[in-house]
Image (cartoon, coloured by chain):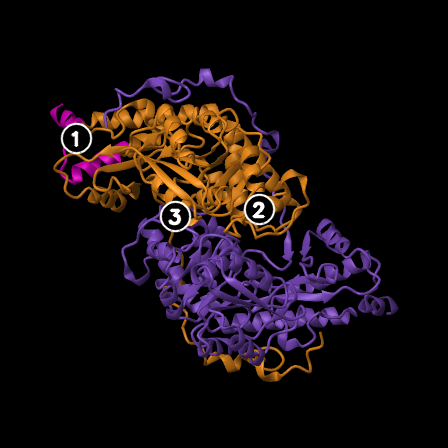
Chain colours: A orange, B purple
Amino acid sequence: MRLQQLSRAFLPLIGGRGIHCSRVLKRMDVPPPSSILNPLHHEEITLFGPGPTNTAPRVCHASSLQTFGIFNPPMVDLMKEVQEGLRYLFQTKNELTYAVNASGMAGMETALTNLLEPKDRLMSLTNGCWGGIAAEVGERCGAIVTKLEHPPGVPFSSDEVEKALKEHKPHVLYVAQSESSTGLLQPVEKLGSICHQNNCLLVVDTVASLGAAPFFMDRWEVDVVYSATQKAISCQTGLAPISFSSRAREKIASRKTKVQSYVFDVNKNMVQWGVDGVAKKYHHTYSSTLLLSLREALSMIAAEGLEQMWKRHSENTKRLCNGIEELGLELFIKDPAYRLPTVTAICIPEGVESPGSLNAYCMEKHKVEFGAALPPLVGKVWRIGIMGYNSTEWHTNKALSVFKDGLLHIGYTPKAAKVKAEL
Amino acid sequence: MRLQQLSRAFLPLIGGRGIHCSRVLKRMDVPPPSSILNPLHHEEITLFGPGPTNTAPRVCHASSLQTFGIFNPPMVDLMKEVQEGLRYLFQTKNELTYAVNASGMAGMETALTNLLEPKDRLMSLTNGCWGGIAAEVGERCGAIVTKLEHPPGVPFSSDEVEKALKEHKPHVLYVAQSESSTGLLQPVEKLGSICHQNNCLLVVDTVASLGAAPFFMDRWEVDVVYSATQKAISCQTGLAPISFSSRAREKIASRKTKVQSYVFDVNKNMVQWGVDGVAKKYHHTYSSTLLLSLREALSMIAAEGLEQMWKRHSENTKRLCNGIEELGLELFIKDPAYRLPTVTAICIPEGVESPGSLNAYCMEKHKVEFGAALPPLVGKVWRIGIMGYNSTEWHTNKALSVFKDGLLHIGYTPKAAKVKAEL
């Protein structure tokens, strides 16, 4: 371990003992950028897009608190409380319940890369954009992927899913409860038992529905569920809550190959979360900032109660839908029973040539974000998200009034505006 | 698109039009956990571990600001400013410079999974814990991995690296500038040109050195560099700054297989960052909270100047090392020129049976975190990190005085304590 005898040829750049900065000063290649030297100007936007939504003030405050070390006692408590809050939110008793330290998309990747080995079969229910992305993630795992497809916004019935499972015999079925690109709420409560009768595991994406629509992980026999924090949960972006059933854990434990991602490997993550009471071991550095935020968001959820949250989201989205129809516009999902209680897709009426200019105008004039369409509905729908902290009567009315102003701006005369003019 | 004719058999759980919560109320499977209903109690810890370190107050404030939507105008500006600040920090003009939306370990995975295809050869310089982890990440990519190994804390010379490159002909060489498990600063400035003479790409891990030790990406011909925000940068945990040279981009562009990770796929991420001036396209939802924090941390770095940051870290770590030696203890890295200016490893003296009890005592009594050892040095060293916001004379003196009290607690009488008793 004595280094004195080693060649001096590779001493650090500045040489010798310690860094002599006078020799460095003239040698910078890239100067400090002037843009970043300006004071931060933070403009608050009201987020009526498909998510992220605005963060609850109590949650914003929590994220300003000082950082914890990886295994500091308050960090250990924090992780435990987050797990307990997530079990309530998912309605599960699963021990393996935690938050992936990245975006909702990382939740999808964690779910699929851990369950799938090369040559395993994945079936992806596809009636909007998410099923296609899940299929791509599955392909990158080396899985053989079948997409069961419907036109955008058309839900799958349990009968047709059952038929497809019998035909294709997938190891894993992917479904989005919240098809936010179309505003569809896909019923999932019967799929778990159908999957298990067919020796298949069920992965449910609840990114844009968890906390807003009923979800019962254990009762519905869901094997892996994941979500994201920036939607109905009213927390900032950056974590993906996830939970694994005992069936999912058995599949992971019996893998013949290592999970291809080191970062998202459940076996590594669960040790850091102390799942099954094992001694915690470092895998990577979790963001205590985001976990503090999530803890506060979960605390607000526990205090309000899930039933009340579901009711609140249902009522405000109904209020929004009524208001949109009163403006003379058509909703993309016709049957209210299949409408997401968070993201609503509105058909762009004929004759509107530049629907994006409505969004740009509302951002410029009102500092309000509305959602653009994602494939496959680009140019066909606008999307309005009323969720989490913003799921209130006040926010819904604001969304409607700003949207109406946007319609007038692009030259579409809403029915209600006509009525008002006639009075 | 008309759904009225579809079977009613799969209506959402609660049935009918809208959610009738009275029917749900009695049906919850998991009650709200009492732990999370308690008010949040936040205890501030002084972080003298190997990272995360304490966050600068200005950065804490930035993270409490309201969330932005994915492509809101202030979010677009924010991402641009972060890129400019990172180019200064890395000393690069690389267009493909951004922040991975996850931990530093995700920076490693992004670097390696994008550069490596199955059967490619990776050489990992291993003289502590990180080289072994990089080797494992490379294996999970299907690469053929060679570890060039030294005992912990012994740096590699450019001559031996050159020899190994000629022998093993790897496509990618991994090296940690900051071997934080041992406190080693590995010289890397000559490796880029050696790699390029041998048709190899150079990946440098600067997680625990960036902002504290000189680093010149372009001048040193580094192909991929990544770091983490929670060390010398004084930002919270959760982002991994990264940059790719034109050579690295050519390799990625010529891949025959898709990158196995969807989330970390550079081709997807660069479109969301608007690299090369392309129209931005959604890939996943970045955390505006963490980007606001990073923007503020980068602004502080630009205002202080990298040269001054390097000087400050060098001086305070020297102050710490002197203090440790005055206590009669030996440093793990003998030659000061090879000591990291952030994390210092201290040899545990003979006769200390339970070195962890020092850490536990300092946490309990002083709310101070010191670092435990990671493999391969468990039981052999303590680690003290003085970095970022905590790299001040005041913090260094505090670390020394608390550490000394910890030594007394475990029954080791420091030399300096003896002196004091004699006076």
Q: What range is drawn magenta here?
A: A400-423
> What's the residue at 33%, 56% (across, down)?
B271
The quarter of the rendered structure image containing the N terminus of chain B is top left
| Residue A308 position by quadrant | top left
Cα separation, mark 3 vs mark 1, equals 34 Å
Label 3 CA crowd tier, 10 Å (few <14, some 14–19, many 20+): some
Q: Is residue A176 magenta?
A: no
Tag 1, which chain?
Answer: A
What percent of the width, then of the height, locates residue B258? Answer: 38, 55
| Residue B349 position by quadrant | bottom right
Taking depth in this image into account, of A346 and B84 the one nearest to the observer is: A346
Q: Residue furthest right?
A: B422
The quarter of the rendered structure image containing the C terminus of chain B is bottom right
> Mark 3 near mark 1, Cβ–Cβ under 8 Å?
no
Q: Which amino acid, by three-letter code, is at mark 1?
A: Pro
User: Considering only vertical position in the picture, is B278 above or below A214?
Assistant: below
Residue corresponding to mark 3: B284
Label 1 CA crowd tier, 10 Å (few <14, some 14–19, many 20+): some
Q: Which amino acid, by three-letter code, is at mark 2?
A: Asn
Residue corresponding to mark 1: A414
Which of marks 2 and 1 precedes in the sequence? Answer: 2
Cα separation, mark 2 vs mark 3, equals 21 Å
Badge 3 element: loop
Please tell me if label 3 and label 1 are on a single chain: no
Taking depth in this image into account, of A179 and B239 the one nearest to the observer is: A179
* Closer to viewer: mark 2 or mark 3: 2
Residue corresponding to mark 2: A269
Badge 1 element: loop
| Residue A191 position by quadrant | top left
User: Considering only vertical position in the picture, is A17 above or below B304?
Assistant: below
